[in-house]
Amino acid sequence: MAESIAFDIITTLGSPLLQQLGLWWNLKDDLQDLKSIVSAIKAVLLDAEEKSASSNRVKDFLEKLKDVLYDADDLLDDIRTEAQRKDLMSGNKLTKEVRVFLSSTNQVAYGLKMGRKIKAIMARLSSIQSEANTFNFVEREHPVETPFMARRRQQTHSFVRKNEIIGREDDKAALLKLLLDTEFESEENVFVIPIVGIGGLGKTALAQLVYNEEMDEKEFELKMWVCVSDVFDVRIIVENIIKSVTNQELNQNLGMDQLQKQLRDKIDGKKYLLVLDDIWNEDRELWFSLKKLLMGGARGSRIIVTTRSHKVAKITSRCQPHVLKRLSNDDAWSLFKDIAFEQRSVDSTNSAFVEIGKQVLERCGGVPLVIRAIAGTLSFKETENEWLSIKDNELARISQNDDKVLSTLKLSYDHLPSYLKHCFAYCAIYSKDYKIVVQNLVQFWIAQGFVKQSDSSQSLEEIGFGYFNGLVERCFFQELEEDEFWGMTCKMHDFMHDVAESIAGRESNILDSSRRELDEKCRHISFDFSSISLLKGNKLRTLKKFSNKKVEFMSNANWALLISNCKRLRVLVLGDLSLDMVPRSIHKLKHLRYLDVSWSPHIKFLPKSICKIQNLQVLKLDFCIMVEELPKKIDKLVNLTHLGLEGCWSLTRMPRGIGKLTSLQRLSMFVVDKDSSHGAAAADLSELSGLNNLRGELRITNLGFVKNAEKKFKAANLKEKQHLQSLVLLWSGDRDVDDDDYEDEKKSLEDLKPHCNLKKLSVVGWRGNAKFPGWLSSLTNLVDIGIKGPSKFKHLPSFARLPHLRRLNISKLTELEYMDDISDPSASGGQGDSESFFPSLTSLTLSQCPNMQSWWRKRPFDGEDEDRKVIGTPTMAFPCLSFLHIEDCPLNSMPLYPSVDDELRLVNTSSRPLKQTIQMSGTMKTPSTSSPPLSKLKSFEVENIEELDLDLLNECLQNMTSLKQWAIGSCHWLKSLSGWLQQLTGLKRLKIKDCGELDLEGMQWELLKNLSDLEINNLPQLVSLPTWLQHLVQLKSLEIKKCSGLRSLFPVFQHLTSLESLQIFDCEELELSADGIQTFQDDTRSLSYLCLENIPKCRHLPEWLHHLTSLRVLHLHDLPNLASFPDEMHCLTSLELLDLRFLPELPNWNKIAHIPHIWVNAVPVQ
């Protein structure tokens, strides 16, 4: 850590700007002396940091050093910031290194002031350098293996007892298949098989298990085991391979040439198995220097490599690595039980010990090493109280006190490049099991100065993501997911988090209800808002508020405390606070790089002073829904790279000058001034011209209000924005448009051509000519297209040949008549061209296109039957479509969709394509599959489908053997579902709507034993819950809507013991406090969510309500006759949210004051 801070300072001191500042402020000698002493100290820091692991004196020395280095870094940042401020004031970019200094008096005074501060830092560093000399540190540029490191990673061997390995049978079978199956032969005689996983998962044990498997001797003539570990020394590895073959010590005087001859003599021409355990080397050339000596083995030879790094796996082998997972819950419990109850087998049946053990096991995360360590600790504890003490008090400290666990995992940290070490340690600011937004984390690293730009062709963010991937490859992060809103997210294993905490030490802290002390050395904090009064000291660089659901208010006093005590902040995250303003004094945080005030619903403006924070790189205002305008002088934020405006719906314009922010990489929204009332203060589209570094998504709104559109749209220069991934064009706003405006918009849409790298395009509300621009066909990288009206499109260009298109969403195109015009030779959709027809499309949505009767254009003549009027026939099929929604489109002719396997939703449309799909014959052009059409479909919804009858529905359901969700609506001819129940036994969700003749009684509903969600909507014949409901033992969610005849939930409801969610809406006759209701109270303790809305006969909340001890959320809406609340409301101890809307009377506050979150008429009051 100290080494990387020193590196930052030396880099800064060597910059041309600092050298020029040194000349003008008479600081040249001081800065040079500072650079020299920091360089001298840095030279021994690698040695010092390695020795600190075993010496508290060295650790204290490094703490003092870091403190001074941080102060030096802050001082240099002060100097840079002042220079930048004066440069902006001068207004002359051509002579910025000179003109900064032209104010003579202030210049001299400032130089003297900085000189004194530098000399003070120098004095502290000189004292520390003298102390360093007493430790006799060695100058080094690269880490070496110390005796301490060697002790922590003992040499492995090939032997293991089979009964010691639990839960690896499938892994063993997979590896044996790779070892013995000839289908895995490669071009080379020797095939390398990597095993990858975090420390402690049992990679070595698995390799031992496979190595010792009894095999026919002809499988492998030679079997060798070598532990490589930290130092990848080819000579040592070759020696150990020869020793493993001969079982003899080698002559230490042999040269490398003699050794390689001996090795080749032993293995060439022989089929061998070699295990290279615990490889860390990421140098490709070093690996190849060993590999070429091993390639002489006979065909079928295998090398097993175990490593923690995916990068090592890629270097050593072309095949996919075998990634070792954590143990399953059952296997983890089996291992835990064998160790924890080894001496007292009788306790393994004691329910109290078992319950505590399973809670403890959750903390182990399925890692065998951790399970063994913690179970071993518990095996010496004999009483239940001792086990409880371990679980409640000591468990969080076990990994930190158990050298074997922590040191094993810390090995991965020791082998990191120095530039990744502080990136990993920084992650200690996150709580355990926190879902980390990767982009935010990378931006935090950049704000702290951890990310270095050595290649100007890459942005700092791209380099930062490279850092993140480097940590992922080494298994520091897990559970990588792609979130639709947040982008990539990840988590850290609890024990990796322990490593980060041990590395960060006093520099990072999490302040919450259990930790209320702030170390004066702390630099990075995540805090609960209630802890804000504890913020003191002037060293904090990160202040990040927890995200939670509490309604919290940031007062002026809170702001004053924060700004006065935290002037060195680089990162300030205050999202989710009910901020009503940002104070003018915010500019005093001059080191600030990252400011997040997102989700502040009351902020309308930002202070002008925010534009004085020249270092600001990221400003996040996402979902500040009342923000109307941005500061006028935003162009002064010359280092701004990210401006987050997602969900800022009240924003009226962009400030003039925003186009000068050429470093901008993310601008989530650009708002065109609607009525030009702001004149020169508002930016027009020409300000986008030079913003060619934009990445991610750009949303341009109010395009319908642009004057002189052809010129302005060209000026936006979208075609040069090669890094842009997504473009959203919105013509929002209602106004009368004459023919001239239409003509103008027709031209301008052509002028909004984006770069061909674009992945996602959305066009919303374009009202121009009915023809789409011709540039669409050139966007061959498009993955997602959305076209939404209102508009005048009568047809769209063919999307069928776009090779990467996966999602297509067409909605509200009220004049659209067809999708494909085959008179266009570039279009597709007729017969004979199935291979290029939507080759990648997986999701298609067509909604609210009332004039679209066919996918293809109709012939302009009459006298033919309907089938022959349509050019193209419905024998064409989507090859890989898995998701299809058609709603409010009378589409009776379209490509068929037999491959749909995720979701099929048909609402207010024709049944003809469905019938043709389900009846597809083998002669039609279908995707290559042997399965019947729609046989893999998981979700099926049909509502108000023209010509849908019992026979067609029966034919569909017979094919849909994989169905998990079914919704049926507006089938007035449907009287019973009995005929289908036997083939729907796998159903998990069922929705029945607007089926007036349907009788739910008298059917064998017990066949639906897997049903977990049921929705009943507008079934007027329903008077009480049908008796069959009691057979649905897995039912977790029940929703009842608009059942005007429903009078009672009982007696059936009391049998729904698994129910977790109950929602009742618009039931006019329902009584909630009927006789016999008391039987309900003991069987509904699983209920956690209850919503009651528009139930006129609900005069009193039922007394049984207080028995719902698991209830967490209660919504009470529009209950016009509700007169009272039960006195026992205080018994709802688990209730977290009470939402009250449109009630004639509110409950006594004393009855509900214990509930954390209370909303009244959509306003939070607690």
Image (cartoon, rainbow, N blue to C red):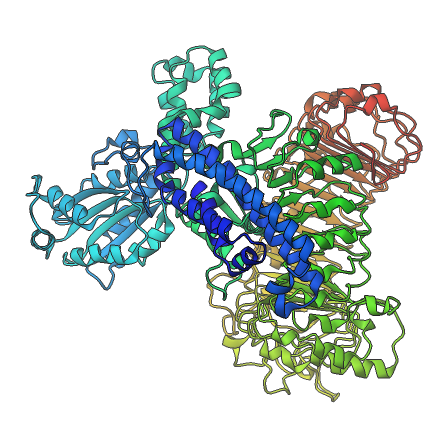
262 relative position to 552: left or right? left
Q: Is residue 820 above or below residue 1087?
A: below
Which residue sits at x=11%, y=46%?
Answer: 242
Q: Position of residue 356 (x, y in %)?
A: 50, 20
629 relative position to 461: left or right? right
In the rendered image, which quarter contains the C terminus?
A: top right
Q: Position of residue 210 (x, y in %)?
A: 24, 41
Q: Is residue 689 visible?
A: yes
Q: Position of residue 849 (x, y in %)?
A: 76, 69
**Which quadrant of the figure has residue 950?**
bottom right
**Which quadrant of the figure has residue 906?**
bottom right
Q: Is residue 438 above or below residue 505?
A: below
Q: Position of residue 528 (x, y in %)?
A: 66, 32
In the rendered image, which quarter contains the N terminus?
A: top left
Which residue sits at x=28%, y=51%?
Answer: 193
Q: In the depicted view, which residue is nearer to us: 1027 or 157?
A: 157
1099 relative position to 422: left or right? right
